[in-house]
Amino acid sequence: MENNKDRSGWLQVVQVAGFFLGGILAIPLAIGISAGSTLHATLGFIGSILIFQPFATAAGILLGIPPVPILLIMISIGISVIFIFFGICDLFSEKSAWLRAHLDKVDAIAKRSALFQKYGIITLIPFIWVPGVGLYGCVLLSWLFGWKDLKGISIILAGWMLAVLLVLGASLGAMEVIT
């Protein structure tokens, strides 16, 4: 029985590493380079996304990456971050009795919250914009409240892409004024 848990843990580590290498590095690099961007500009854009999240869209424009590849890179990184954080949370929750106890407390609070009772997972969409929360925090909140299904992933990704599209539109508008 313990051997199966060890295998399951290693499988989760491999999945997380795969999403990181594939969805955060390989796919965005392939998209950026195929769009005519340099390796350095694409890596700089990827790094800025991991730090500034949807606001990094403006950096992509400034680095000369066309809008459609920016959107594709943002989708790849958004999906990957969701699955990476879910995987990490699952891995640690299985190993930590302390975390499991805190998760039970969060679940009890969520059941008493009128906001979460009324709007549910939709409440995560505005949190994408909150500095310090952003995509990472929304995925963690979604995991804590048990919203790890297709609906939860879709809503988080929709909030992410809404933020990206708004920043992209504002950035393109600003570039038009500058030039």
Image (cartoon, grey):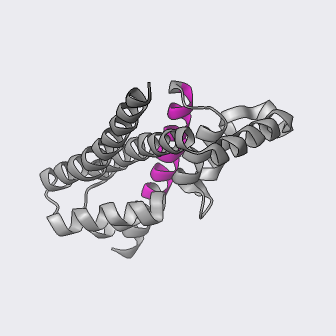
Residue at 34% x, 39% y: name it. 10
Q: Is residue 145 left or right of residue 23?
A: right
Residue 20 sits inside the magenta stretch:
no
Side of 48 relative to 113 (left or right) = left
Q: Position of residue 130 (x, y in %)?
A: 63, 59
Q: Establish if 64 lies above or below 95.
A: below
Query: Looking at this rendering, what residue extends furthest in the bottom direction?
Result: 178
- Say which residue appears at 45% left-offset and 40% top-offset: 87
Residue 155, magenta (yes or no): yes
What residue is at 26 percent from the left and 56 percent from the top? 66
Does 8 sit above or below residue 126? above
Q: Toward the viewer: 162 or 160?
A: 160
Between 78 and 14, which is closer to the camera in this rendering? Answer: 14
Left or right: 22 in relation to 175? left
Q: Which region of the structure is painted magenta?
A: 151-168
Picture mark count: 0
- What percent of the width, then of the height, locates residue 106? 74, 42
Image quarter of the N terminus: top left
Q: In this view, does 97 lie to the left or right of 44?
A: right
- Farthest residue to the front: give it: 2
Residue 27 coordinates in the image, percent (x, y): 23, 46
Q: Nearer the viewer, residue 84 or 24?
A: 84
What's the residue at 37%, 66% (across, down)? 48
Quadrant position of the C terminus in the picture = bottom left
Residue 38 makes an appearance in the image: no
Residue 122 occupies which quadrant of the picture? top right
| Most common SS among magenta residues | helix
Image coordinates of residue 160 in percent, x first then y, are 50, 46
119 to 32, vertically: above or below: above
